[in-house]
Each structure stands twice: as C-alpha cells, then as structure tokens.
Image (cartoon, coloured by chain):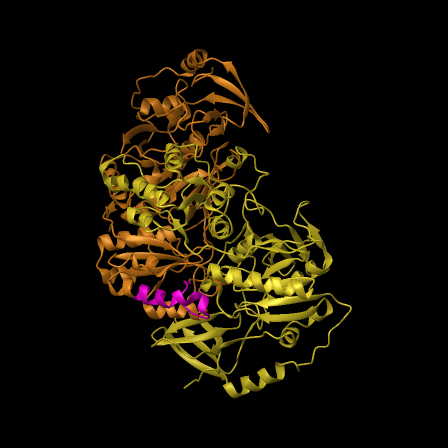
Chain colours: A orange, B yellow
Amino acid sequence: MPHPGDSVKITTEKDTLEGILLPSFEKGVILIKLKNGYNIGFTEKEIKKIEVLQGREQNKEEGKNEKKERRELKKNTVLPTIVILHTGGTIASKVDYRTGGVTSAFSPEELISLFPELAKIVHIESELVAQMWSDDLRFAHFTLIAQAIERWVKKGVQGIIIGMGTDNLAVAAAALSFTVEKSPIPILFVGAQRSSDRGSSDAAMNLICAAEFITKTDFGGVGICMHGTSSDDVCAILPATKTYKLHSSRRDAFQPVNDEAIATVNYQNKEITFNKKEYQKREELLIVKPKMEEKVGLLKIHINMFPEQFSFFKGFKGLIIEGTGLGHTPGQVPNELCEIHKKIYPAIKEVIDSGCIVVMTTQCLFGGINMNVYSKGRDLLELGVIPGRDMLANTALVKLAWLLGNYSRTEAEKLIGQNLRGEINERLKYEESFIE
Amino acid sequence: MPHPGDSVKITTEKDTLEGILLPSFEKGVILIKLKNGYNIGFTEKEIKKIEVLQGREQNKEEGKNEKKERRELKKNTVLPTIVILHTGGTIASKVDYRTGGVTSAFSPEELISLFPELAKIVHIESELVAQMWSDDLRFAHFTLIAQAIERWVKKGVQGIIIGMGTDNLAVAAAALSFTVEKSPIPILFVGAQRSSDRGSSDAAMNLICAAEFITKTDFGGVGICMHGTSSDDVCAILPATKTYKLHSSRRDAFQPVNDEAIATVNYQNKEITFNKKEYQKREELLIVKPKMEEKVGLLKIHINMFPEQFSFFKGFKGLIIEGTGLGHTPGQVPNELCEIHKKIYPAIKEVIDSGCIVVMTTQCLFGGINMNVYSKGRDLLELGVIPGRDMLANTALVKLAWLLGNYSRTEAEKLIGQNLRGEINERLKYEESFIE
C-alpha cells in the first residue's frame, strides 16, 4: 500500500503516469504530483495498477541532499538593493517531498538559496506583506501593499519586486499603478505559473529578468515581468493597466491587450529592448494615494440576464458593466420572448439614480467600446452609462474604486473616461480603434 | 444649418472628419456616419466648424441611382436551395441615406440585389425568424430558431444560413449545436461586423463563403462562417462550441479557443481546406431537442466579491462560475482584510444545496481548469462544484440550460463534464492542457 510521499507509477485505461503520491483530500480519489509540477487526481475506479517506484524515506533523503546550505547573507554594498514583497502564490513556493505540500520561501537567505543567480545582480531584502492566494485579494489589500511600498521607498531601496499568485496579478498591478501615482523607483509584479522546484518553473527567470530590468533601466512605473513566450528566451515587461491573464496555465499567459509590451529582457544575454519610447520614468518624489472605495462591483453580461442582476448594485458607489460587443446590454423588447427585458433599463436607471457611477466596458477583451454605433449603446448613454473606452473591465474596476476612494464623485465621474496610467490607449484614434 | 442626411465635414481641435449627418439623439451631441460605416459623436463644444459638402436631396438621388433594380427571382433548379434565417443584426442591413437609419433586407430578391454573387452559387429562400439585436437573445430564442430549422429541413433545403448580430453569435451557435443533435444538412451562423453598404463590409464575403462551404462539402454540423483574417482573403469555418468574439470591431473578431478552425474558404478561388479530419458529417435524420431551462445563470469572479453575489443564484437550476486561473473563487481568510470571505463558501454550498448544478470554468479563456492543483480548487470540489474542464463559460452556460431542459438533473450533472459537441477538447490530455 503506497503512502503519501512515495514515488508511484499509476496505470489507467488510457495512460501511465509517474509522480509523488499526495495525501488524498477526497474519498475515492488518488492524487499525485506530476514531474511538471501539477497535481492530477484519479478516481479509484479509473486506476488499474499502482506501483511504488521509490519510497518516501528515500525521496526525503534526496530532498535533503538537494537543499543548498543556507548562508548568512552579508550586505553586498556594490550591488543595488531591492526588496521582494511577498504576498503569496506559486512564485516562491517549493514542494515538501514528505507531504507533497507546498511551502514558501520568504527570507532573503531562502530566496538566494532557491535563486542563486539573483545574488549576482542585486542585494535582496524581503518582507512578508501577506501570505495568500491572489484570488482572495480585496481592494483593502492594495492599500496594504501601497503602504509597504511607501515604507521601502523611505528606506531607500532601488527597486521593488512584488511576488504574487497569478490569478489576480494583472488586476493587482493595475490597482497599484493607480495608488502609486509617482515613484522614484520601479515596482514590478512577478509571478510564476509553475512552482520553483520544477524543471519547467518560470519563477527564477521571471525574478532574474525583473532584477535585470530594475537595475539597468530608467523605468519608474508599475509593471509586470513574466515570460514573453512559452520558451525560456525572453521575459516581457508588461503595462500594468493593459495586461490580461489569457491562459490558465501557460508560462506566457500574460498578454498585453490593446497595447504592447513596454520592453523585453533577453534571459540569455540579459539585453533589454524597449518597444515603447514613452514609458514612465523615475520621479523625484513618491506620491501614494492608497485609498480604495469598497462598494464597487462588476457585472458581466451574458445571454438570459435577469433585471435583479442589475438591481443588486443599487446603493453601490460604482459598477463596471462588462457588456457585449461595442458596449451593450439586453434591454429592448423586439418580441414577447424577451418581455423581461422591459425591466432592465429601469433597473440600470435605478442603480444610477442611487448615486452609483456605471461604466461600460467590453467582454471581447480586444478593441474598445463605441456606444454611438447601435441604438443599444445610445439607449445606455441616455440612461447615464459612461463609456469606458478601451479599458479592460478589471482595470476599470480598480480604477473606479481608486477614484472613488480619493476624489469626489464628480471628479471620479470625469476622470474615469480619461487616460491616467496608460489604461486608455490614446494612440488609437476614435474611429481607428474600431477598424483594424 | 446642416440637416440630417447632408454630407458634412466636421473640424475639431484634433481632426477633420467627413460623413453623413444623422438625427441627433442626445442634447448637445452631433452624430455623423463615417465612410467606414461607423457612427461617431461629437459634443458641440468640441466642434470648431461644420461645412455641408453635399445636400441631403442630392444624397437621396444618388442613393436611388445606386439601387439596383429588383427582379422577380425564378427558382434556379440547377443550383442547390438554401434558406437564410434572419434574426437581425448588421449582416443584412443597409443605411437609409435620407435618415441615416439602418434598414434591413430580408426577401430573397433584396438579398440577391445586395449580394448578386450569391445567385450564382445557390437558390435562396428566406424567413424572418426575429428582428432583434443579438444582445437581446434569451434561451427561448434558441428554441424558436431550432423550430425554424426543423421546418426548413422538412422542406428539403440543402443548407441553412442563420444571419445574426455578432454580439452573441458565437453563444447562439453553441446553443444550436446542442439543440440540433443530428442534422442532414449544414447550419452556418453568419454575421457582419460592418454593414453591407460599406466598402469594408464583411457581409458579402462571409455569406458567399458560407454558401460555397455548404454546397461543396459533406459537413453536417452547426458552425460559424466569419472572416479568417483582417483581409478579404479567407473565411474561417469555426467550431460552434469553441469560438469567442475576441475583438469588438475587427472583421476577424471570431477566434477558436482551445481549438482550431474546422476549415477555411478562400474567397478568391473558392478553394476549401479542412484543418480537421474529424468533423460532423451529414446524418440521415434530423434530431432536435429544442428545450432550454430558463433558470440558469453565470457569475464572473473578480476582485472584491460579495457573498450575496453567490446567494443570488439560490433556487436556480444551474450556475456557471467563471473563475480565475485554474478555477478559483475567493473563500479563504488568510487575514482580517478578507474576513467577508468566510461567508463565500457557505453561500456557494447553499446554492448547491438548493438543487443548483454549479460548474466551474475559467475567465482566462484559453487553457482549461484544474481544480486539483491548489487548495482553492480542492475546497470548491468538496463543496460540490463540478469542473467544466476547458469549456468556454458561455458554452457551458447554454449547454447546462439545454441539459436541464432535456434531461433529468442527475443526467445533466453527469453530462456537463462530458464532451458532446466538441465543447471539451479531448485531444488535450489532462495534464497537457495545463502545459503548453
């Protein structure tokens, strides 16, 4: 009978897979960690045979031998100092071979032991800001991170790397690019799609490219550093407000939308190539506006909407609608099958009348909205819905929460449609954005 | 003072634009129809100068001259007969030069006058099933369209083209691929991103390629025919359950997700190239299961969710969650800033306990979910959330509504995770779908 921690080979009808047996969490399900770092579950029914390839004791021994000796890090005064702010996620996590559980490496010593190349580029400080999955982030965490940034800028570090889970990394980067209005140092969000103890891990390369970019350029904004392709050739420095996680597992999941990467960092020769001439440079002073309004929501439109889905946001301060196409919701009644749509415009109106700023974006992701093309868009404009131009829905969400946290309602209403941090692509002319 | 229908030149601070003045719908806003077919609005403040280039009377004359003479269509008994089912949208619409309004062309005669090339490929019949924007579609409309399909198959047509607005065209195609289980003829959804009276219109090419594909192949399923690139070179025949409108305005907005186009149709030489060896062939008999369950919803996860957003679906029959990453929602409480997440798992549990089938998909669009990788996924599995594998959220939504309309709850629960119409990419091995 195999035990958690054993290396096993599992044979099913279709496949033979090898991995480390994990403690099971579900009755009748056998879970193993594959060599590629992912876990896979089998129902007991599916499994034809399990063989133990190597016992857990030997795995544990090998794990120990692999462990590099910890050294006391002395401050290297020649290299620039950066701080890694940890907020959780796969980026600095390592599997525990005895239990299959994932543990985290937080201290500068642990980080250098995991990523020795980093020590040649920068002197590292670190702080555990929060230990959580990025899918549990709320607006309040962005305030927390902004405050940590303030502390470390005051201490004089030359750059900040924020390690975070990837699910909401792009959204968090967008939020922080609003809260940190001006910065004397670059702030890069770095994540990993595969944990760092695996051959296919992107953690080391993403961190090293981020450190190279921080130390070699005059960039002073908030950005994202992740794999630029599915190979280990280049990392992309992505615009914080214009990036979407467009694949659930690829290492190059993060893609610019209605925009391009700011720069690329070649992992082999460490050459940095800027794609954009205009990017945020380092400023003299740090200006942080960390507040976020809590009562701001998002509603994605789909087939078969109910009016109550809109009414839910009555009393909210802000609502982003992720409409279809050029910025539409249901609301007309061309035939009796959509009789219920009679109640949708009134529901939207009620939300707006309750004091809520309602902004339209598109679920197409690429391209922008244009509410003047079809009668649907014009109906919504008349109700008081504000066009969100080509902003990503998630970016519009954190921008609106930030505006309402730091400005009056009137100012927020004015600023939501204006480009503040590259979140609206002004190089696209109004009509061009709708024509390729 | 210019009047609606006049050709005008508008000068603003930034731009000079020409177009036809439209009736204004908003106070202080001047609206013109550009040559590219889109409308653009200006506030009166922005406008420095308006010049009338040509009066509306002359525009009207020219419009008349442009109008081709209507001919009485005689049935061409050599060519195969297809039916165009109209449901509205840009595909068969034409601007009225006097008013700037968009009118629709429905009769076979009008269609042939708009698209004369069609008459060389097929004999056309037509039916106006509904005249509406696709963003007003509800599940009940899919039943209506399925019934129209039944009628025309009985009449013996050799193919069906469904003209529809593009906002929800891909979702409708997915729904119809479930309701039409087997078909003796091909059924293609065709839309247009630009109206047919404009140079850049994609209407003619999309319709002609669809007609070519219908008459020249043995394809017998439901598909989508739209521009394959931004040029007028090829149309793509796209898989109904695996296609997403990924751009709000480009003509090649429709892209396959976790899949590839079934075939391409070369517009110049009309050559058809299949990318897939396996595709749905014509069946002997038509099998239609047109029912759709009304109480099925979709919830997209974002930063700062409230438990009530989940509770809303208590009493629904089905709910698709569009989670983050590999299939996650908030729900853990790593620190006091997300105290409110304590209520999220119980809210999901309550929805499930109310009899609702809850299915997880990913908002990354590309890649699938894997709820065994992180503790979040495992938490949700334990609550009873069903993995939606690599299904698009919208496809999962219409599939679940269809399953619940035609099968028992137990069968629906079993079938939602099984591939019925290509909606789950089985060629991706379980672990491969998470590794590029």
Q: Residue furthest bottom?
A: B57
Q: Residue at x 26, y 55 (%)?
A: A403
Q: What is the span of residues highlighted in magenta in the rendered image?
A: A328-349
Residue B374, image x, y percentages: 40, 32
Q: Residue at x 32, y 25 (%)?
A: A108
Q: Is residue A349 above or below residue A218?
A: below
Residue A331 among those drawn in magenta: yes
Q: Is residue B240 above or below residue B59?
A: above
* Left or right of residue B428: residue A90: left
Residue A375 among those drawn in magenta: no
Q: Nearer the viewer, residue B265 or B62?
A: B265
Q: Residue at x 52, y 88 (%)?
A: B57
Q: Residue furthest front?
A: B408
Q: Quadrant of residue A162?
A: top left
Q: Is residue A387 above or below residue B413?
A: below
* Left or right of residue A220: residue B227: right
Residue A264, image x, y percentages: 47, 41
Residue B157, image x, y percentages: 68, 64
Tell me the chief SS of the magenta region: helix
Q: Is residue B217 visible?
A: yes
